[in-house]
Amino acid sequence: MSMSNYLSKLWFGLSAEGHHLAAADLSAMDSKPQLVGSWKELEPHWKWEESEDSQFVHLGSGRFCIARFFEAMEVGGEFGIELVQQNFVILTGVEVKLAVNDVDCSNSGNGKTKLEVTTHKSLFHGSNGTFIDTVF
């Protein structure tokens, strides 16, 4: 089975727990969807708090862009007593491919197909004093 055929049978979304990129096989309509994988593409700084639900968009050919919304409090001012709230979004490019198996490239060996996720560049976009609630 070719990669594009297999990936077209999967549904991608953000998981309910942890909001990670996840893939489910919905091809068997008479049974419960099978989770194929879940991946965390970004490890946020411990001072960042998520401020909105994450969003993602499919860019085609197994590529996605994931937007994660955060806020952070910074101490500012001359005497270090002024708190400044920063709202920002991190956009991360992700690519999903079939994992390459050195022994069996047909993926018919054990009935389990594994996916490989490559995280590409992440970009920061600050709010300049406004609140960001959507990007796509």
Image (tube, rainbow, N blue to C red):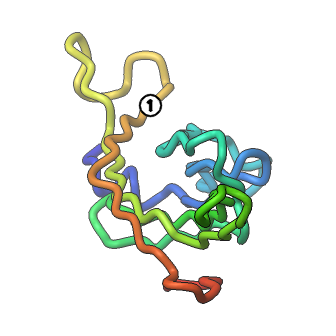
Please tell me how many numbered marks the rendered image carries. Answer: 1
Q: Given the current orientation, which residue lies at the most extreme front position?
A: 79
The residue drawn where x is 23% and y is 25% is: 105
Q: Position of residue 17 (x, y in %)?
A: 78, 46
Q: Given the current orientation, which residue lies at the most extreme top position?
A: 103
Pick the residue in front: 81 or 44.
81
- Callout 1: SS: loop
The residue drawn where x is 44% and y is 31% is: 113
**Relative side of 89 to 95, left or right:** right
Q: Where is residue 132 in the image (x, y as percent from the top left)?
A: 60, 83
Q: Quadrant of the N terminus?
A: top left
Location of residue 99 (image quadrant): top left
The residue drawn where x is 39% and y is 58% is: 92
Location of residue 91 (image quadrant): bottom left
Q: Position of residue 87 (x, y in %)?
A: 60, 72
How many residues crowd mark 1 within 10 Å: few (<14), some (14–19), many (20+)? some
Pick the residue in front: 75 or 29.
75
In the depicted structure, whether residue 42 falls above or below residue 59: above
The residue drawn where x is 71% and y is 71% is: 52
Which residue bears the numbered disc 1?
113
**Relative side of 82 to 117, left or right:** right
**Relative side of 97 to 10, left or right:** left
Q: Given the current orientation, which residue lies at the most extreme bottom position?
A: 130
**Relative side of 48 to 6, left or right:** right
Pick the residue in front: 44 or 93.
44
Q: Where is residue 44 in the image (x, y as percent from the top left)?
A: 56, 45
In the depicted structure, whether residue 16 falls above or below residue 123: above
Report the amino acid beneath label 1: Thr
